[in-house]
């Protein structure tokens, strides 16, 4: 018999520690293994399948576009790209969008915009971007440099210079870093996802926004994981009463196809000009059509349901036996457990529920439209596994 697992082990670069599960299909919040086993999916492909697997509306949008025009080049105008950019700007108050294919690329664009803006305003010696310890911004050499976790850096030196890491939620520390450096940008995740679902305080995020305003520094919010309805708002920064200069996003935006976006405010909208940046696939019609079908459905009544589901999960898990703390917002939830997180993941998997880890926590990122019955069933399994 053909062994996919052995092909994969032999021929695919060993960059991932995979679970011994071969997923062949999915429907909504359910995933199906080759052995016929059914799982409730509390991962959505790490926050990507915003409407679950093979959501009919998303499939229709993507299939229709694939049958019309799958790609041209950025030398021509195409409908899905322009419509998606318009929708994103209208819903956020941002002014322009650059499209790439991933979160890392969205952040690369954000960093380029911040550097060029600051070089033009303050001179080309002003290039330092402040990010936070324990952050995660991607795997390219520049976004790795931005990422404030040393273990990702080892043996890949030298990384792109020009990044300083400040301590998350240390207001005075951030003020000091800004006072002592010519800062070209401050970049943060409102909730550090890979760092263990650690939310930033309102005071800290607002201080960052204030410092940026006072010193004419572009504020970049990395919404790759927190964006597109995940926290119960369209973007997580909307929970903090601030207005960023640049928002990077990806993951849930495409609903399962690769797309990343850097949204630029009026202030920085014209920093990049023809020839400054580009991406062959950027704004690809199929990906953009899928993303538009996602973004168009994230309205107030849908987001209210995300919040209601979130409240249910927090209520069930806070103070449950074996649970030390529950963190996060919306359907981006971290659980600090007495047991090792990986043991909880295995126990859940054996019971037919897929969950993630983030550092030492168990992490839940279910599809935003997960039916309440599936959510209830999955949370009971998680609860049992934490005991
Ligand atoms: C996943 C993630 C990235 C990287 O996204 P890719 O699409 O894997 O390049 C960047 N920032 C944050 C906050 C993320 O969660």
Image: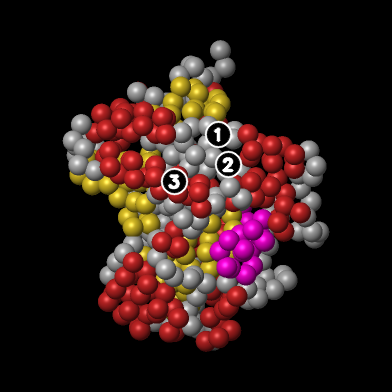
Is residue 350 positioned above or below 74 on the image?
above
Is residue 329 positioned above or below 18 on the image?
below
Residue at disc 3, secondary structure: helix
Alpha carbon distance from label 2 to label 1: 8 Å
Q: Quadrant of the C terminus?
A: top left
Q: Quadrant of residue 213?
A: bottom left
Label 2 crowd bin: few (<14), some (14–19), many (20+), radius 10 Å: many
Alpha carbon distance from label 1 to label 3: 17 Å
Mark nearer the N terminus (2 vs 1): 1
Q: Ligand 1 within 8 A of label 3's CB?
A: no
Residue found at x 53% / y 61%: 248
Front-most of residues 302 and 348: 302
Q: Position of residue 36 (x, y in %)?
A: 49, 17
Residue position marked by numbered label 1 in the rendering: 53
Callout 2–callout 1 Cβ contact below 8 Å? yes
Q: Position of residue 179 (x, y in %)?
A: 35, 84
Q: Position of residue 234 (x, y in %)?
A: 50, 56
Residue found at x 59% / y 51%: 295
Residue position marked by numbered label 3 in the rendering: 306
Residue position marked by numbered label 2 in the rendering: 256
Relative horizontal placement of residue 310, taking residue 56 as reference (left or right): left
Is residue 221 positioned above or below 289 on the image?
below
Residues drawn in magenta? 84-102
Please identify the residue farthest to the front as the structure is shown. Answer: 301
Q: Quadrant of the N terminus?
A: top right
Is residue 131 positioned above or below 386 on the image?
below
Please identify the residue farthest to the top as the structure is shown. Answer: 1
Q: Quadrant of residue 199?
A: bottom left
Callout 2–callout 3 Cβ contact below 8 Å? no
Residue at disc 1, secondary structure: loop
Relative horizontal placement of residue 241, taking residue 293 as reference (left or right): left
Q: Position of residue 281 (x, y in %)?
A: 69, 52
């Amino acid at each position: 018999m053909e062994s996919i697992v052995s092909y994969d082990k032999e021929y695919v670069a060993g960059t991932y520690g995979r679970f011994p599960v071969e997923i062949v299909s999915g429907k909504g919040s359910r995933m199906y293994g080759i052995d016929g086993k059914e799982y409730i999916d509390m991962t959505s492909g790490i926050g990507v399948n915003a409407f679950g697997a093979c959501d009919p509306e998303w499939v229709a949008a993507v299939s229709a576009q694939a049958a019309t025009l799958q790609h041209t080049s950025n030398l021509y105008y195409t409908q899905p790209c322009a419509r998606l950019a318009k929708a994103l700007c209208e819903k956020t108050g941002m002014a322009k969008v650059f499209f790439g294919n991933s979160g890392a690329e969205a952040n690369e664009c954000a960093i380029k915009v911040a550097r060029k803006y600051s070089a033009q305003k303050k001179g080309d010696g002003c290039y330092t971007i402040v990010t936070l310890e324990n952050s995660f911004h991607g795997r390219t050499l520049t976004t790795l440099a931005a990422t404030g976790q040393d273990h990702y850096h080892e043996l890949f030196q030298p990384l792109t210079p020009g990044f300083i890491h400040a301590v998350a939620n240390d207001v005075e520390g951030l003020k000091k870093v800004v006072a002592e450096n010519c800062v070209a940008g401050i970049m943060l995740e409102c909730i550090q996802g890979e760092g263990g679902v650690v939310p930033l305080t309102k005071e800290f995020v607002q201080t960052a926004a204030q410092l940026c305003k006072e010193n004419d520094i572009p504020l970049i919010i990395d919404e790759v994981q927190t964006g597109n309805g995940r926290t119960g708002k369209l973007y997580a920064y909307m929970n903090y009463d601030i207005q960023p200069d640049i928002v990077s996003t990806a993951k849930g935006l495409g609903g399962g196809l690769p797309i990343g976006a850097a949204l630029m405010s009026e202030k920085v909208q014209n920093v990049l000009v023809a020839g400054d940046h580009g991406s062959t696939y950027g704004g690809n019609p199929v990906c953009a059509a899928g993303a538009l079908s996602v973004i168009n459905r994230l309205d107030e009544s849908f987001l209210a349901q995300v919040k209601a589901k979130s409240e249910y999960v927090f209520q069930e898990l806070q103070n449950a036996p074996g649970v030390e703390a529950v963190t996060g917002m919306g359907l981006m939830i971290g659980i600090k457990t007495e047991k090792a997180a990986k043991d909880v993941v295995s126990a859940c998997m054996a019971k037919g529920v897929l969950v993630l880890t983030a550092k030492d926590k168990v992490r839940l990122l279910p599809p935003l439209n997960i039916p309440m019955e599936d959510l209830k069933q999955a949370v009971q399994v998680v609860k049992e596994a934490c005991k």
